[in-house]
Image (cartoon, rainbow, N blue to C red):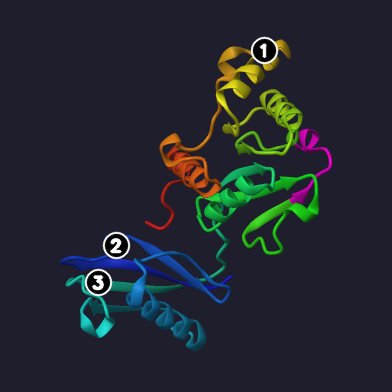
Amino acid sequence: MTGIRIRVARTAGSVPREAGAEMLVTAEGTEGTIGGGALEWQAMAEARAMLADGRTRMERTWPLGPALGQCCGGSVTLSFERAESLERATGAPLWVWGAGHVGRAIVATMAPLPAFDITWIDAATDRFPQETHGVTVVPAADMPRLAARAPREAHHLILTYSHEIDLALCHALLTRGFAGAGLIGSATKWARFRSRLAALGHERAQILRIACPIGDPALGKHPQAIAVGVAAALLTATRDQVGDRTG
């Protein structure tokens, strides 16, 4: 894959992003951001022109004023460099178990984030939306059996329609190993699960690695509110592991 890497080389005054921020423009799309708005649109147009005409590098400065329809008041110098044989960067593996209302909200919120590679699992294909861009959809009649083969470095969100499946997934993941896990449910559900998982032979310290409830209680219980809280927690948890790939 060939692309144009756009980097904020220098800045002066008030600007939307700092020096070092990057984005990548390819024939297939874009990754990252240099701040959005008219500046980013013009930079993308320049990058696509470079892809078409074969230029390998350039640098250009934009004042962020009325001509761009931006009122930051500073200026940004962008460097453009052609990059060949690119491989798409991969994020932390995130497995989402369940395609109900909360599962859909979480995937819709997190799929655009470059920090995660999402695998979305449910027992029935008709529970998934028709379009799932940037997500690997896996219908699985026996979800706990699939969990036993999940990558040990993956993060998991357990959100199925069944408490018994949720429990079986927790058991399978505790047996397999994981980077992080969250379970939807109440404090009462989690107390019962802790007792049952202990009876299945799991150590208390390992059981407590599963977060339950998930989300930020201050944001409420609406599916989208839960999704925002979950996304914030996962971004924080994986920040050191993945880093900010856009600069």
In the picture, the quarter occupied by the C terminus is bottom left
- The CA span between labels 1 and 3 is 57 Å
Q: Residue at x 44, y 54 (%)?
A: 245
**What is the crowding at mark 2: few (fewer than 14 residues within 10 Å), some, or many (at least 20)?**
some
Element type where label 2 sits in the image:
loop
In the picture, the quarter occupied by the N terminus is bottom right
The verdict on residue 108 being magenta is no
54 w.r.t. 218: above or below: below
- The CA span between labels 3 and 2 is 9 Å
Q: Which residue is mark 2?
A: 17
Q: Is residue 138 left or right of residue 24?
A: right
Q: Which residue is mark 3?
A: 76
Element type where label 1 sits in the image:
helix
Give the magenta range: 138-146
Q: Residue at x 63, y 48 (%)?
A: 101
Nearer the N terminus, badge 2 or badge 1? Answer: 2
100 w.r.t. 208: above or below: below
166 w.r.t. 47: above or below: above
Whether residues under marks 2 and 1 lie with C-beta atoms below 8 angstroms apart, the answer is: no
Element type where label 3 sits in the image:
strand
Q: Which residue is mark 1?
A: 198
Nearer the N terminus, badge 1 or badge 3? Answer: 3
Q: Residue at x 24, y 72 (%)?
A: 76
**What is the crowding at mark 1: few (fewer than 14 residues within 10 Å), some, or many (at least 20)?**
some
Q: Residue furthest right?
A: 141
Residue type of the residue flagged with mark 1? Ala
Nearer the N terminus, badge 3 or badge 2? Answer: 2
